[in-house]
Image (spheres, helix red, strand yellow):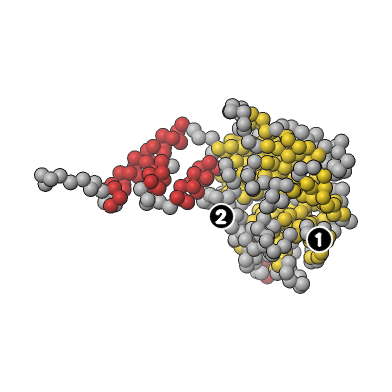
Amino acid sequence: MLGFLSGRRAGLDDPLRLRRAESTRRILSLELNPDRDVERIHGNGVNTIDIEVIEGRYMLSGGADGVIVIYDLENFSGKPHYTCKAICTVGRSSRYVHKFSVETVQWYPHDTGMFVSSSFDKTMKVWDTETLKPAEVFQFEGNVYCHHMSPIARKHSLIAVGTKEPKIQLCDLKSGSRIHVLQGHRGEVLSVCWSPRYEHILATASADSRVRVWDVRRAAGSLFTLDQHNGDKSKAASEAVNTTHDGRVNGLCFSGDGLFLLTTGTDNRMRLWNSATGENTLVNYGKVSNESRKGLKFTVSGGCSPEFVFVPCGSSVAVYALHTGKLVTMLRGHYNNVDCCEFHPNYQELYSGGKDCNILAWVPVLRGPDIEEETRVLKKDAAARHSSGNPAFEDAWSSDED
């Protein structure tokens, strides 16, 4: 790392390289933080968490008890050991609380004054953060498994909603009504995700073993369905044709640049797809344990190279290299199954929630050997640059006597 600093100071390295290298180093040194606790509020499992991107300071959580909590992640105590306090709670005593399990919570992408939650009580609620009262309530015919708002949309304010019905509902925040239905799946919709690259592109995953990609501006059906065999008839002959996984598909996540789409299924497989063509890249992640009957909330790192994937696997969080499929490490600390995790790109931290009712913070740790290694690399790098005759390191001093 000191070598990158030296190169940046001399103008030989792009500053972005330093940022990516440091982000990558921090992710590779993630450990359970003994000095940071998250206040335990939920009386049952934590199903979903979300960190707002405006300040990167406030975190939402939703639990199987129907409770929604807002945490402040900042440390103002001046001490290394501190607890992230719950500053607001929609608890069981509130008349507006969800009656059953909260499956998804999400901050409004452009303002912390609003957030959205969906639940097994067949409702999705749009909340005013200040008053903790719902400004809008959408009713559905079946349990709501998931919802998602586009992180980049400027031309629409649609929320995609997946329910027990095979239809994807599109709800408009501006009009407060359901304006469109996407039909094509044959089973319950377990996960939905908008592209972070194109605001009209939506991916949906279902219990029918398929993932469909849609352009919501089109009146026709989906753009394409992801096929694990890439259209190879010989491989698909003895198996279900045109399926994304051999079991229920319960997890979706785009890469940070939106060029790739990750899917997880109950066949214990995770697959990486080209989001533009729908081609299976055939990256082998090995066995990714997945027994969830509902949606699986996993996440991808941002601002580093290479990118990493954080996936709940039993009572641990598995960390994979996105493009090689290599298992980097397993983060162990929960006492029961992990249901969700969320990456904090500002500080390269990870938060995970599970059935043990806990939210754990995983933070980068810099060890002594790392510093020694960086010092060694700096010396080697400096010697190499001096010997290469780079003008930036040449001695321009001269003497009148010469």
Q: Residue 171, relative to residue 27: is it above or below? A: below
Is residue 248 visible to the viewer in this orientation of the structure? no
Residue drawn at (41%, 44%) of the image: 5
The residue tagged 1 is: 175
Q: In which image quadrant can residue 212 be found?
A: bottom right
Q: Indicate the quadrant containing the N terminus: top left, top right, bottom left or bottom right.
A: top left
Q: How much space separates mark 1 and mark 2, taking CA atoms?
A: 41 Å
Q: Residue furthest bottom?
A: 220
Disc 2 crowd rating (10 Å Cα; few below 14, some 14-19, many 20+) is: some
Whole-percent x, y for residue 175 in the image: 81, 60
Residue drawn at (55%, 37%) of the image: 364
Q: Which mark is residue 300?
A: none
Q: Nearer the observer, disc 1 or disc 2?
A: 1
Q: State which tag comes first along the sequence, 1 or 2.
A: 1
Residue contact between numbered discs 1 and 2, judged by CB atoms under 8 Å: no
Is residue 368 visible to the viewer in this orientation of the structure? yes
The residue tagged 2 is: 323
Disc 1 secondary structure class = loop
Residue drawn at (73%, 71%) of the image: 218
Q: In which image quadrant can residue 206 be found?
A: bottom right
Q: In which image quadrant can residue 341 be found?
A: top right
Whole-percent x, y for residue 222 in the image: 73, 68
Disc 1 crowd rating (10 Å Cα; few below 14, some 14-19, many 20+) is: few
Residue drawn at (59%, 27%) of the image: 79
Residue type beneath disc 2: His
Disc 2 secondary structure class = loop
Whole-percent x, y for residue 117 in the image: 78, 48
Residue type beneath disc 1: Ser
Q: In screen coordinates, is 299 left or right of 163?
A: left
Whole-percent x, y for residue 26 in the image: 53, 41
